[in-house]
Amino acid sequence: MKNTSQLLLFALIIIQVFKILAYGKGEKDHGGFDERQELVRGRAFKYGFLTIFFLQCFLILWKETIDNIPVEFGLLMMACLMAGCLVTLIYCIYNDAYWELRQKSLPFIGMWLFIMVIAIYGIKNNELVVNGILTWDGGIYVLVGLLFIIILINVLIKMFIDKKDNN
């Protein structure tokens, strides 16, 4: 228990360092989003919400019709939430509404890599499958790792596309 709390404290400190690097120490104006970005983000939130809604409806119907799902139900519900977040984030990334004005992307990429390392550590230290069922304890780290890997890959692809378009 002591090692887990120390790891969490260390993670929070690292996240704060990345936050300072991303926004600057003394800047009052972080830039925010312009009107077009706000509209795109609103549409992205709507698509993300609808994704969560329909996936959770499907999941509940699936659970009622099939008795033996080899995954804990809470983990499946979290997967639905993360899928909705991915829809929102990917829509924002490819419509240039992910980064605020004057925001640096490199500290966030570093933070995502750090979170992926923590997820790998969590996968390594927890049992994924117990009695033939994918458990919350190990499965949540797999979901978090996949979420941030997918976000990172999409951000890098978008950065490559933007760099290619600028040349």
Image: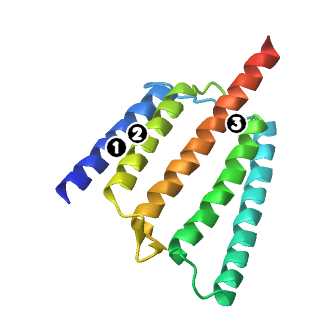
Q: Quadrant of residue 100?
A: top right
Category of crowding for the residue at label 2, using alpha-carbon neighbours closer than 10 angstroms: few (below 14), some (14–19), many (at least 20) = some
Camera-side residue of 93 and 41: 93
Category of crowding for the residue at label 1, using alpha-carbon neighbours closer than 10 angstroms: few (below 14), some (14–19), many (at least 20) = some
Task: Point out the frontmost of discs 1 and 3.
Answer: 1
Q: Which residue is mark 1?
A: 11
Q: Which residue is situated farthest in the top direction here?
A: 167
Q: Which residue is mark 3?
A: 33
Query: Is residue 57 shown above or below 110?
Result: below
Residue 82 point in image, percent of width and height: 60, 58
Residue 121 point in image, percent of width and height: 35, 48
Task: Point out the frontmost of discs 3 and 2.
Answer: 2
Q: Mark 1 near mark 3, Cβ–Cβ under 8 Å?
A: no
Residue found at x 47% / y 36%: 113
Residue 14 point in image, percent of width and height: 36, 37
Quick one: SS at disc 3? loop
Is 127 left or right of 146, judged from the image as shown? left
Query: Is residue 44 shown above or below 24?
Result: below
